[in-house]
Amino acid sequence: MDLRRDVALGARLAVVRTGGLALALAGDPVLRLLYRPWIDDPVPIQRRLREAAQPYPSRSGVLVVATAAMCRDLVRDRRFMVRTRSGGSLGGSVDGGRDPLLEPVDLSFLGMDPPEHTRLRRLVGGWFTPARVNAYEPLATRLAERLADDAARRGRFDLVADVATPLPVAVIAEILGVPDDDADVFARWGQAVGAGLGGVRSLRALHRLDAAVAELRGLLGGLLERRRHDPADDLLSHLAAEDVDTHETISLAALLLLAGFETTSTLLGNAVAAMTDAREPWAQLAADPARSGDAVEESLRLDAPIQFTARTPHETVRLGERDVTPGTVVMAMLGAAGRDPEVHDDPDVFDLDRPTKGEHLAFSGGIHYCLGAPLARLEGRVALAALAERTPSLRRVPGAVRRRSLLLRSYQSLPVTV
Ligand code: HEM
């Protein structure tokens, strides 16, 4: 533990926390999204940001775009990057490197611009095409049915812990080639790391996260080493055989593991909560489980698991009525985009028959478009179908806990009964 670093980080955290809260209390809508009560229901604030119809200047220095058109244009615009001109984290205070508070985990090519992004994404892209992913449908279906059967037998269960999380963990572990015995350990560390992805709020959280990252990297490093000598037909063996630096390979494997399960688990929790709350969509799905693909798309639109992404230009770029200078962080509110009334009628309603199905930015766009989208869609589809078949009268019971995160719109726990 580096004491000097800790003192500096602690001081920065205190300034960010108190300064942010003061601006939130003074009415800054973007900073409000970080605090209770606003964090629990970001929809009214997102509406206000969308209605601004221009990049909205938060007093934190960040610009926010929230209409579907502006968000789409931003993520597709090749002049906007995910690192600053010096290679630093967006909005960070570390010149040319990762800022431990804003970017506590090395997320490989998700946090890189071309040409590095292109090189690493190509290395694994072939493993996540729809055709390749469809080969996992029988396995995903078997797992989803078993989890739903077990849960239905218990009668009362936590949708997140008992179904929504174990399914994506098992599938990504299978693709990567993580042995069954290790899958639980990975899930535990992955969850600890995933929870910290949106940025850390205390030194204690940062230390916990650092320890979890070190453990996860150690486990992945050990597995890669094994695969180098004893290759199998899995993604880790493929990576072990490539001429790529070990540190970089471990970051890449960690990205695939982490990007996949918190997000997919979030999707399933949000979908079940929204459909059972509104009743009719769940009844429609129970009557025809083959419509689970529509349910996935509608849930992604209504409650995007990843609520925003961010970019900065390396040259001055005109955005709406503003000149955005290099280093200025622009946030695209992907969640707000899904509820844009310019695109969707009655945007706050969960409608399985929506004609604009699939028109959302939950998987972002441009060169960082979610690599795992076909896999997430497959897992979402088979899990919702299995639940609708086996627990047609599913409903929530009190005790749901929302994750306190600006990045993930998510239930940490969702108790339900059959
Ligand atoms: C419902 C589930 C999921 C959602 C909502 C989601 C969302 C996203 C979003 C919004 C981005 C882009 C961020 C940006 O533009 O800055 C992204 C990137 C990514 N996602 Fe997903 N994701 C999901 C599931 C998965 C799964 C199952 C995988 C498994 C491999 C995965 C792997 C990735 C990777 C590797 C990237 C980085 C792409 C790049 O930078 O080129 N995701 N995801």
Image (spheres, grey):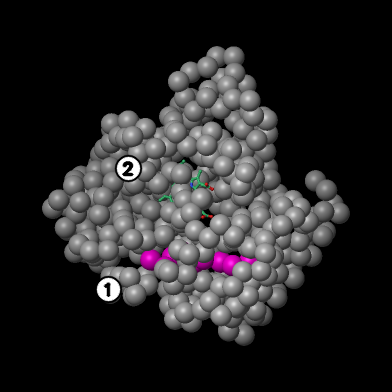
Ligand 1 within 8 Å, label 1 CB: no
Left or right of 8 in this view: 192: left
Eye-nearest disc, 1 or 2: 1
Q: Please report whichever mark, 1 or 2, sits nearer to the chain's N-terminal start.
A: 1
SS assignment at label 2: helix
- In this figure, which residue is indicated by the disc labeled 1? 345
- In this figure, which residue is indicated by the disc labeled 2? 378
Residue at the farthest top position: 230
Residue 11, picture quadrant? bottom right
Q: In the figure, 43 relative to 230: above or below?
A: below
Residue 115, picture quadrant? top right
**Residue 345, percent from left and from top:** 27, 73
Residue drawn at x 40%, y 46% as measured from the top left: 373
Residue 106 painted magenta: no
Mark 2 Cα-neighbour bin, 10 Å: few <14, some 14–19, many ≥20 = many
Left or right of 306 in this view: 200: right
Residue drawn at x 38%, y 41% as measured from the top left: 375
Visible in this render: residue 101?
A: no
Q: In the figure, 5 relative to 121: above or below?
A: below
Residues rendered magenta in the picture: 328-338
